[in-house]
Image (cartoon, helix red, strand yellow):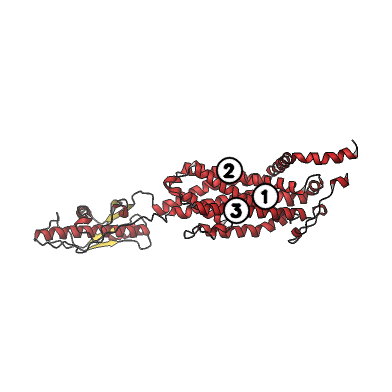
């Protein structure tokens, strides 16, 4: 074939630009997936991270909401007679309801489950105190005057009782508060019966206090946790894109293979587009694996309703979050390629990316704060708008207008980042293995004329 025919074949080969781009992207993606660090962030980290998050969330809810199991108090007396007198008082307090004159009429939900009491008998007062110090007892009871048997309203009732507890033990203090309430209820019941017997209309407790806790519908524990979930997904997506971006730019330069690619009869913009598609593909594979592991963890642990309310984690919600991650990954992959193009070694690229990762944490942490709501100015802040919109999607409170602003803003940022990455990649002196500079992106080097070379 003559030189004229070769020259004429060059423009014809450009007709398959999309096929060539896909082949280049497939080649770059294949090289990225050969890296063990990429596989580690793609598969192993989500497999280990989300079960740990599930356990942490479950422990959080158990500590905040309680397990629902009744507490158990071990109460000691010094004799069988004291035990029978204590039983009389406790039985008297059971007859007393909040409506019949208690000082604090708490609702059953506010009172919680009724504690279980286990009664033990000590041989003497010293043994009773030793039982408290050795944690065999939570509370000790000593009667100074014995009660009449049975307790009746037509008889006077007067007794002094010592309640011994261990000051450094939270369980002992809880048992003390519980017995104090029971004794107050018994006193109120006896006084009410005595007043009725004497035909006195005054009730024993003139002013009753009713405790009515109200659940905050807007701000629950799920509000802050629903911001943590999209933040974790975004950070994992960033992590999945870091190693491919470094390996396909600084890594290839360090291995000496980037010069060969640039010298090939392929436009540099096509090379950059292929690398960009490879990094974006790995980032979205990481996002997909993370979403899958998160869904499996929430389904197995049963934390979906606690985190996301009655709406739960629906397939539509998963698709919305995946689209949000795709939008963010498109922006961040271009930023990573632009930064790593300056580096001539793997370590140098890592040094460039550390400040970027630290800067990425700041808006992400701000998005976790309960008082931070998505507004028009915040919808223009990168990363923060994604976290806030993801939180609103999980909570089912998304605003269509603000969501559109977030999408358009991130599309604009992604386009701008791609332009900067293309400028940087085109201006790099890769043929001479020279490090890029922060101002070199302003000087695009002209590509070689293939027809003149031929």
Residue 266 x %, y %: 78, 45
Q: CA distance from mark 3 to mark 1?
A: 23 Å
Marking on residue 47: none
Given this view, does label 3 or label 1 mark the residue nearer the observer?
Answer: 3
Nearest the eye: 21 or 229? 21
**Badge 2: residue crowd in 10 Å (few <14, some 14–19, many ≥20):** many
Given this view, does label 3 or label 2 mark the residue nearer the observer?
Answer: 3
Nearest the eye: 39 or 148? 39
SS at circle 2: helix
Marking on residue 243: 1
Image check: 174 left or right of 449? left
Residue 363 in which image quadrant: bottom right
Specify the quadrant that holds the C terminus.
Answer: top right
Q: Earlier in the sequence, mark 3 or mark 1?
A: 1
> What residue did someone put label 3 on?
410
Image check: 214 left or right of 311? left
Residue 450 sits above or below residue 92 on the image: above
SS at circle 1: helix
In the picture as drawn, the residue positioned furthest to the right comes out as 2
Residues at badges 3 and 1 in contact (C-beta under 8 Å)? no
Q: CA distance from mark 3 to mark 2?
A: 23 Å
Q: Earlier in the sequence, mark 2 or mark 1?
A: 1
Q: Earlier in the sequence, mark 3 or mark 2?
A: 2
Nearest the eye: 160 or 278? 278
Residue 30 x %, y %: 70, 41
**Badge 1: residue crowd in 10 Å (few <14, some 14–19, many ≥20):** many
Residue 233 x %, y %: 56, 49
Residue 122 appears in the picture as rendered: no
Residue 191 x %, y %: 16, 60
> What residue did someone put label 2 on?
289
Residue 313 appears in the picture as rendered: yes
Residue at image location 38% in from the left, 62% down from the top:
168
């Amino acid at each position: 074939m003559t030189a004229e025919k070769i020259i004429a074949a060059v423009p014809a080969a450009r007709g398959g630009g999309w096929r060539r781009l896909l082949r280049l992207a497939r080649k770059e993606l294949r090289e990225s997936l050969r890296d063990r660090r990429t596989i580690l962030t793609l598969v192993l980290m989500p497999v280990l991270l989300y079960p740990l998050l599930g356990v942490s969330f479950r422990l959080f809810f158990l500590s905040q909401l309680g397990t629902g199991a009744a507490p158990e108090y071990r109460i000691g007396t010094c004799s069988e007679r004291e035990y029978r007198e204590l039983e009389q008082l406790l039985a008297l307090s059971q007859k007393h309801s909040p409506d019949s004159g208690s000082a604090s009429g708490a609702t059953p939900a506010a009172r919680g489950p009724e504690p279980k009491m286990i009664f033990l008998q000590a041989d003497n007062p010293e043994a009773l105190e030793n039982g408290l110090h050795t944690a065999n007892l939570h509370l000790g009871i000593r009667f100074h005057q014995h009660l009449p048997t049975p307790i009746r309203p037509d008889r006077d009732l007067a007794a002094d009782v010592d309640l011994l507890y261990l000051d450094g033990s939270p369980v002992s203090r809880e048992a003390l508060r519980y017995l104090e309430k029971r004794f107050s209820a018994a006193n109120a019941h006896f006084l009410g019966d005595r007043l009725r017997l004497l035909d006195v209309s005054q009730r024993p407790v003139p002013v009753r206090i009713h405790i009515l806790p109200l659940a905050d519908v807007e701000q629950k524990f799920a509000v802050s946790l629903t911001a943590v979930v999209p933040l974790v997904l975004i950070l994992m997506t960033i992590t999945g894109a870091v190693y491919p971006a470094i390996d396909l730019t600084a890594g290839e330069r360090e291995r000496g293979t980037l010069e060969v690619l640039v010298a090939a009869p392929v436009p540099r913009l096509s090379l950059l587009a292929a690398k960009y598609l490879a990094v974006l593909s790995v980032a979205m594979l990481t996002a997909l694996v993370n979403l899958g592991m998160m869904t499996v963890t929430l389904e197995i642990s049963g934390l979906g309703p606690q985190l996301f309310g009655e709406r739960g984690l629906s397939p539509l919600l998963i698709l919305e979050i995946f689209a949000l991650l795709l939008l963010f990954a498109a922006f961040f992959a271009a930023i990573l390629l632009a930064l790593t193009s300056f580096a001539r070694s793997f370590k140098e690229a890592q040094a460039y990316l550390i400040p970027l990762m630290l800067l990425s944490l700041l808006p992400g942490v701000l998005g976790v704060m309960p008082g931070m709501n998505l507004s028009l100015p915040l919808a223009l802040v990168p990363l923060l708008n994604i976290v806030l919109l993801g939180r609103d999607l999980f909570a089912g409170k998304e605003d269509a207008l603000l969501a559109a602003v977030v999408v358009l803003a991130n599309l604009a940022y992604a386009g701008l980042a791609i332009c900067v990455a293309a400028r940087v990649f085109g201006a790099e002196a890769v043929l001479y293995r020279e490090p890029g500079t922060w101002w070199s992106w302003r000087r695009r080097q002209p590509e070689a004329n293939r027809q003149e070379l031929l």
